[in-house]
């Protein structure tokens, strides 16, 4: 009797692992490798449209991190991965990131970042990948100047702008959607 209970127990454990692995989905990063992972989903609700152009502006103001990088940058990578998975063409995606506030330090090159934080900028690789994909970046000169940062301290992919407020307003007037 004990042997039959053990066999039943082992059978249940085996079935659990079989069905768990059969239904488990893998996190992928199809466009921005290593950042903003997604799960491929086959439901049509809320899916990206291949016929739609996506023009978005991200207000990168918070200092929060996700997977070791700025959370706003991580969300940008995730959106690109979602759109890519949805078969939206790269030329249909226009994305802008405006850096200011508590996120200002992400605009710093490794030398300037290391001087302040004693380590290289952990956002540099992601910013390079996003810029190579076509994302435009601006940093707020108002906030950067207040912190003592110069244009020479910025990563080369990030342009100085008069202010974050004016960049966001200008792009919204052009039809860009402000992303949270």
Image: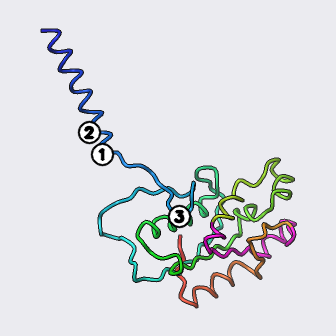
Instruction: Residue 18: name its quadrant.
Output: top left
Magenta span has 134?
yes
Circle 3: element type = loop
Tell me the quadrant of the picture where the N terminus can be found: top left
Residue plotted at (63% across, 74% down): 135
Q: CA distance from mark 1 to mark 3?
A: 24 Å
Q: Label 3 crowding class (10 Å Cα cut-off): few <14, some 14-19, many 20+? A: many
User: What residue would you read off at disc 1?
Assistant: 23
Residue at 38% across, 58% down: 40
First-in-chain label (3 vs 2)? 2
Query: Tags 1 and 2 in contact by the CB under 8 Å rule?
Result: yes
Mark 1 vs 3, N-terminal side: 1
Is residue 31 shown above or below 53?
above
In screen coordinates, is 67 left or right of 54? right
C-alpha separation, residue under disc 1 versus residue under disc 2: 6 Å
Which label is found at residue 31?
3
Query: Residue at horizontal 16%, vertical 15%?
Result: 5
Q: Secondary structure at mark 1?
A: helix
Would residue 16 be counted in the magenta stretch?
Answer: no
Task: Classify residue 176 by image quadrant.
Answer: bottom right
Q: Secondary structure at mark 2?
A: helix
Residue under label 2: 19
When the figure is inspected, residue 117 is found, relative to residue 176, above or below; the finding is above
**Where does residue 153 sit, x and y in percent of width and height?**
85, 66
Q: Position of residue 43 (x, y in %)?
A: 29, 64
The magenta stretch spans which residues?
Answer: 130-152
């Amino acid at each position: 009797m004990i042997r039959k209970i053990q066999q039943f127990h082992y059978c249940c454990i085996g079935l659990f692992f079989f069905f768990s692995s059969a239904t488990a989905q893998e996190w992928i990063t199809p466009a921005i490798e290593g950042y903003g992972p997604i799960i491929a989903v086959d439901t049509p609700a809320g899916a990206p449209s291949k016929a739609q152009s996506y023009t978005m502006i991200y207000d990168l103001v918070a200092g929060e991190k996700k997977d070791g990088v700025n959370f706003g940058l991580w969300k940008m990578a995730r959106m690109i991965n979602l759109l890519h998975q949805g078969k939206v063409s790269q030329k249909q995606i226009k994305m802008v990131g405006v850096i200011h506030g508590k996120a200002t330090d992400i605009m710093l090159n490794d030398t300037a970042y290391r001087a302040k934080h004693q380590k290289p900028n952990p956002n540099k690789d992601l910013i390079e990948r996003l810029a190579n994909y076509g994302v435009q970046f601006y940093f707020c000169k108002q906030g950067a100047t207040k912190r003592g940062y110069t244009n020479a301290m910025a990563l080369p992919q990030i342009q100085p702008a008069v202010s974050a407020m004016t960049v966001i307003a200008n792009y919204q007037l052009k039809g860009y959607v402000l992303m949270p």
